[in-house]
Amino acid sequence: VSVISQALYAFVFCTRYIDLFWKNPGDNLWNFIFKIFYIVSSLYILLLMTRIFSRTREREMSYRLGAYILLGSLILAPFITMIAEKMWGPPFSNILVNFSLILESVCVLPQLLLLRQTTVPTVIDSYYLVALGAYRALYICNWIERYATDTVKPETVAVIFGVLQTLLYVDFAWVYYSRQRVKLRSGGIVDADDLSKSWRGGEAGAGG
């Protein structure tokens, strides 16, 4: 599992739930508890990966990609917020929320890059990415239902970058679908040959 992706997810939760500092927990206690859980669990996972299980297979390219993702999200967030809210100088908290939405949409890229760089990724990586993709797909189903039945529509920024994030998982789904020798449920692996069949793998091969 990519420690860079986990660090980016920690950034996502810490910036999205910054309203914990001024919102009354009693207004929505259940929501407050889950926000705390997301932040604490992401930081705890990051601690385990950097201090307890510190061995990593990630290369310099992955760290550069993580830096580009973080910097790009920081640059885009103010402009996206101004466009979405149609106002100059939007509240800083709104910029942080949109920064978290932009960042979350591409957090998985270091994980997908690690999967390509690793000769024999474990089946855990496959289950992990399938679970993340299913989580995002359910979000899209919820948005469709809200557009059809709810008076409070989903935020445009969340929808756009949520769809982008889902498309990244589609690439892994294609790898999963195109595997011909082993199955996940039998403890199989995603190997280099499988990855070469992905959209990104095919493009990388054509570019090389």
Image (cartoon, grey):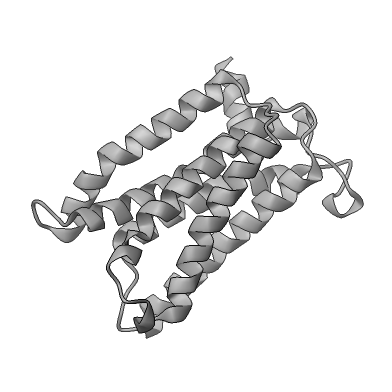
Q: Position of residue 120 (x, y in %)?
A: 80, 31
- Quadrant the C terminus occupies: top right
* 125 lies left or right of 61: right
Q: Where residue 102 sits: x, y (%)?
A: 37, 48
- Give coordinates of residue 180: x percent, y percent: 84, 42
Count of picture labels: 0
Observer-nearest of 69 and 7: 7
- Image quarter where the N terminus lies is top right
In the rendered image, the residue lying farthest to the left is 88
Q: Is residue 150 visible?
A: yes
Q: Quadrant of residue 91?
A: bottom left
The front one of 110 and 16 is 16
**Is 119 situated above or below 185?**
above
Q: Is residue 88 left or right of residue 58?
A: left
Using the rendered image of the protein, determine whether residue 105 is visible from the camera's viewpoint. Answer: no
Residue beneath the point at 42% across and 29% down: 67
The residue at 48%/64% (across/down) is 36
- Which residue lies most toward the top here? 208
Judge by depth and name the residue closer to the eye, 9 or 101. Answer: 9
| In the rendered image, the vertical position of residue 22 relative to residue 111, given as above or below | below
